[in-house]
Amino acid sequence: MTGPSSSPVRLHVVTGKGGTGKTTVATAMALALASRGQRVLLAEVEGRQGLSQVLDVAPLGTEERTLVTDPSGGEVVGLSVDAKTALLEYLQKFYKLGRAGSVLEKVGAVDFATTIAPGVRDVLLIGRVYEAVGRVTKGAKKRPVFDAVVLDAPPTGRIGRFLNVNSEVSEVAKVGPVRNQADSITRLLQSPTTAVHLVTLLEEMPVQETIDAIDELGGLSLRIGSVIANGVRQPLVADADASAVADRDPAVREALEAALAAVDVRTGPALLAGLLEEGADHVDRARLQAQQREVLRELPVPVRVLPHLADGVESGALRLLADHLDEQGAI
C-alpha cells in the first residue's frame, strides 16, 4: 500500500509513562507511515533528543531535516520544537518584529516569557506542530506538505495539561492572537484529524497511568487512537509447567539437571539455583503480563501489542515494530 492513507488521522500524538518506550513507538509509527509512500514529520517537544538517539542520527534542530527515506518514495522529516524559536517565529508572523525579535532574545525577554507562562509555552510548542499539519504546497494545486505528523509528546502525567491549551492560556490571554491560536489548535486536537496513542508496559503502574490518562483525555474531548503495549515478552514455559517452575519444585530441578547433563553441560548448585530463580522470575513476569493484558482488554479502545526487543533498538528492529503497528491497524 502506497500513497496517502485512507485514514482521516493526520496528527498522531504519542504519549506514555516515562520508560515505556514512547519515543521508540513514535519513531516506528513514523516509519510505518513513510513505508506507505507518505511524507511524515516526526517532531519532539521536550528537547531530550530522544528521536535522534533512537534513529542514531545527529541531534535534531529547529529546522526540518530529512532523517529517513523509504524505497516506496516516502520519507521521515525530523524536527525538535523549541519554545524560544517558536516564540520568535510567532512574534515575526503576527507582529513583524524583524530585528527587534533578536533584541528581545539578547535581553532575555524570550526566556522570561516562555518560563513565566508555561501555558503559553505549550501553545507555542503545539502551535509549531499545528502549522506543520496545516501547511500546504505553493501553486495552483495545493496539497499538504506532510501527509502525516507524528508528535513525540510529553508523558501521560503531563499530557492532559499540555494538550488542554485553551485552559492553560485562559488566565493570560482572553483575547488576541494567542487566544485565537489556542482556539484553532483546540479545534484541530478535538477533530477526527487527530488521535492520541498511549504507550504502556504490561505492568501495574504504567497500565493504571494509561487508564487515568484515557479518562482525562476523554474529558477534554480528545480522541484516543490506540493503547500500545510495548516490550511484551513471549512466555517460554508451558502453562502445564508454570506452577512447578514458579514454586521451584524439586522435580523441576531434577529435570533441569538431567537435561543439561544430556548435552554435556556440567552443573553445580549455584548454576542450578540461578537458572531456577530465572525461570521462576520469568513465570511471574508472564503472569503479570497476562493479568495486565486482561485489564487493558476492558478499555473501550483498541489495544496493539509490540514485542520485546532482546537486542535493543536498531534500524532492523524499528522496521519490525513499524510492521507490527501497520499490520495491527494502529495507523
Image (tube, helix red, strand yellow):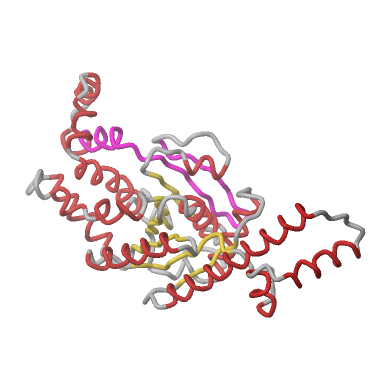
Q: Is residue 166 above or below residue 261?
A: above
Give the tally of numbered discs. 0
> Which residue is at the front of the view, 245 or 237?
245
Q: Is residue 82 left or right of residue 64?
A: left
- Determine which quarter of the picture holds residue 121: top left
The residue at the point 33 percent across, 64 percent down is 193
Across and down, in percent, residue 203 comes to 47, 62
Which residues are the magenta region?
A: 63-92
Residue 211 at x, y = what percent? 35, 67
Where is residue 159 drawn, in percent x and y? 31, 54
* Front one among 189 and 7: 189
**x and y percentages locating residue 179 in the rendered image:** 13, 49
Left or right, 45 with respect to 312, comes to: left
| Residue 69 counted in the magenta span | yes
Pick the residue in front: 50 or 194: 50
Name the residue at the bottom extreme.
240
Instruction: Tell me if 328 is positioned left or right of 184 in this view.
Output: right
Q: Quadrant of the N terminus?
A: bottom right
Q: Is residue 250 magenta?
A: no
Seen at 39% across and 74% down, the residue is 301
Query: Is 20 placed above or below 235 here?
Result: above
